């Protein structure tokens, strides 16, 4: 009797990890300061503003930013808080001002949101 091979289901976490882009693959990533150029105080301000904007549900059990919860938190975001966060990033963390001004437009809003929250989320990854 021959047996039929069982379908292998890929774990959801593995699928989600594959979907996540590396920060340098996010559209506009070259417009923002690299983390190697940030002072500790800049990183603390960015984390503080992110937590103020999204709430502490984006933290894991160790108090680090959990990038897997970041997208869900962004989707439930208050628009005024999102606008303030975009302005905060634009005022403090832009490396290419003319490029940022061209990128940060209404018709590019989703890409802008992806960029600023990916930037903040990248700080919570171990390799940074």
Image: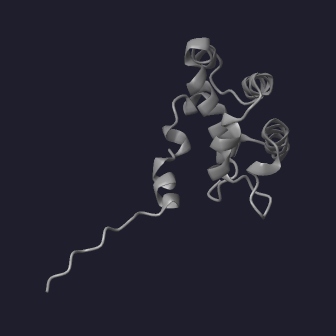
| Residue appearing at x 47%, y 47% in the figure | 19
Nearest the viewer among 50 and 96 is: 50
Left/right placement of residue 36 relative to residue 84 reads left
Q: Can residue 3 be seen in this view?
A: yes
Q: In this view, does 106 lie to the left or right of 65?
A: left
Residue 32 visible to an observer of this rendering: no
In the picture, the quarter occupied by the N terminus is bottom left
* Tally of numbered discs: 0
Which quarter of the figure has residue 96?
top right
Task: Please name whichever residue, 11 or 114, is drawn nearer the observer in this view of the structure.
Answer: 11
The quadrant in which residue 111 appears is top right
Q: Which residue lies furthest to the front in this view?
A: 1
State the residue at coordinates (24%, 74%).
5
Indicate left or right for 25 with 67 as reference.
Answer: left
The residue at 51%/30% (across/down) is 27
Q: Could you say where residue 119 lies in the image, as x and y percent from the top left?
A: 65, 39
Q: Quadrant of residue 64?
A: bottom right
Spot occupied by residue 45 in the image (x, y as percentages of width and height)? 84, 39
The image position of residue 32, as x and y in percent, is 64, 31
Residue 2 left/right relative to 105: left
Residue lying farthest to the left in this orientation? 1
Of the pair 91 and 115, the residue shown nearer to us: 115
**In the image, residue 107 lies at what x, y percent?**
56, 13
Above/below status of 16 relative to 89: below
Q: Which colour scheme is used?
A: one colour
Query: Is residue 126 positioned above or below 43 on the image?
Result: below
């Amino acid at each position: 009797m021959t047996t039929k091979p069982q379908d292998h289901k890929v774990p959801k976490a593995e699928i989600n990890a594959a979907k996540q882009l590396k920060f340098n693959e996010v559209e506009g990533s070259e417009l923002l300061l690299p983390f190697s150029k940030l002072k500790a105080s800049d990183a603390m301000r960015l984390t503080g503003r992110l937590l103020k904007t999204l709430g502490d549900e984006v933290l894991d059990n160790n108090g680090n930013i959990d990038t897997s919860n970041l997208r869900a938190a962004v989707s439930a975001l208050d628009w005024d808080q999102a606008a303030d966060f975009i302005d905060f990033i634009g005022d403090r963390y832009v490396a290419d001002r003319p490029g940022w001004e061209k990128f940060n437009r209404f018709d590019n809003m989703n890409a802008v949101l992806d960029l600023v929250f990916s930037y903040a989320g990248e700080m919570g990854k171990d390799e940074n």
